Amino acid sequence: MCDWIDRFWEKHNLFYTPIIISKDNEYRGALKEIFQKLEDALIEVNAEDHYVEEVKKYRSVLLFAVDQYYCGYIFEAQHQMDELILEVCDSRLAVSHINNSISFCTYLCEQDVQFFRARCNEKITDYKGKEMLHIPFSKRSIVKSERFSILGLPCLYLGTSSYVCWMEMGRPADHMFNVSPVTLDNTQQILNLAVNFRDFCWSKKYSDVNRKSIFKLFLLSLATSFKVKESNRVFKSEYIISQLVMLACMKKGLSGLTYYSKQVENDIFAYSIGVNLALFALYSPEKELSDICNHISISDSFNYSMYKQLTVPQTFRRANLRIDKIGNAQNIGSYDRQYPYKETEFYLFDHYLYAYLKPDEASNVYQEN
C-alpha cells in the first residue's frame, strides 16, 4: 500500500529546504512552482489520490492567502489560514505538549526537552535570567518582524542547541555570543512544524491517519521554508504564510510552534540540534512580560568567548543532555564539509551550560504577580 513512498523518496533532491530564491518578487512564483513539482512527483510515483488532492488544495489556499495579502485584504488572508490551521490541528501529532512533540525525537528519548536562549552584545555582558526573556512590552517599539512574529509583537525564540542559536543570530563573534540554558514546565501546547520531506517518507511506521497528518504538516512546513537573498528589505514576502500561521495558532489557543532552522544549508543538518521553538508572548496589561515566562526556568547567561578562555578542568563539566540519548547521527555543516556535533565546542558548551542550570532555584524562574 505504501510502496509508492519508497519511489517518492527518490525525489528527495527536489524538496530540500530551505528553498533559496534571489529576490522578494520571486516568492509567489517559487511557492507555486514547488507545489507543482510536488504534485507532479506524486503523480509520477502513482501516489494515492488523497495526497495529490491535498497538494492541490494547499497550493490553492496558500496562493490565495498570499494574493489577498498583497491586495491589502489581510482579513481574508487570515481567515483562509485560520480554517487551514483548524484542519491541520486535528491530530495529536500536529498539536502536542513539548515533551510529546515529534519535532524533538521524543520517540527516541523520554527525557524532557532542553533549550537554549541567546543574546548578542558588542561588549561581553553578563545577562541575568530575566534579561534573557523576550523583549518587554514597554519596549515593543524595537520588536522587528521575524519569521513567526510580527512588528510590535514580541516572541520568545528558543533553540535545541547553542549551535542553532549561533546560526539564527547570524554567526556572531565569540565575544558577542551569550547563552542561557532553558527548561519549560511542559504545560504548553504547540504546533509541530519541524517536519520535512524525509519525515514524511519515514512515516510508513505510522497509521494511515497519522501519515496523512504528517503530510499536511510537511506541506505547511514547505510553504514556510523560503529564504530570500535580497538584502535591505523592509517587507519580506516569505514571512507572509509564517506570520498568518502564527496568528492562527494564537487564535486557537496554542502557546507556540516548532520549525527547522532556515539557517542551515540543508534540513538534514537540523535534526534534533537545529530545531527552533517560537513561544508567543501574549500581551498582559500592566505587565512587562507575558505569562508564558512564568513557565520557564532560565539561568543567567554565559559568554562564549569567556567559556573558551577556561582551562580544561573548568570546562570539563557534563550534564544529562538529551542529545547523548538520541542515537541518530547529528552532523552540522554541509554535505561537502560536515562534522559530528559531539566533536564541536558547541556541544561541550551545551554541557557546560546545563551543568549549571538549577531549575529549583526561585531566582532563576521569572514570576510576576
Image: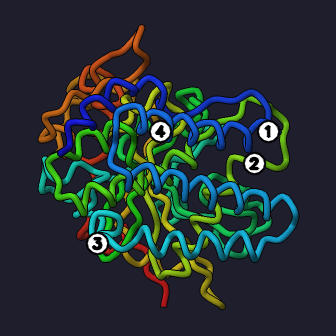
- Residue 344: image quadrant is top left
| Between discs 3 and 2, the one toward the N terminus | 3
**What percent of the width, then of the height, locates residue 332?**
37, 24
Residue pictured at 51% horizontal, 56% vertical: 157
Q: In the image, 357: left or right of 35? A: left
Are the residues at dot 2 and dot 4 in contact (C-beta closer than 8 Å)? no
Q: Which mark is residue 24?
A: 1
| Between discs 1 and 3, the one toward the N terminus | 1
- Residue 361: image quadrant is bottom left
Are the residues at dot 4 and dot 3 in contact (C-beta closer than 8 Å)? no
- Residue type, numbered disc 3: Asp
- Residue type, numbered disc 4: Asn
**What percent of the width, then of the height, locates residue 265?**
50, 25
Label 2, secondary structure: give it: helix
| Near-viewer residue (178 or 232) | 232
Q: CA distance from mark 1 to mark 3?
A: 39 Å
For mark 4, what is the residue?
A: 303
| Between discs 2 and 4, the one toward the N terminus | 2
- Quadrant of the image for the N terminus? top left
How many neighbours does mark 1 have within 10 angstroms: few (below 14), some (14-19), or many (20 or more)? some
Q: CA distance from mark 1 to mark 2?
A: 6 Å
Residue pictured at 74% horizontal, 68% vertical: 152
Which of discs 2 and 4 lies nearer the camera? The answer is 2
Which of discs 3 and 2 lies nearer the camera? The answer is 2
For mark 3, what is the residue?
A: 185
Q: Is residue 69 above or below residue 332?
A: below
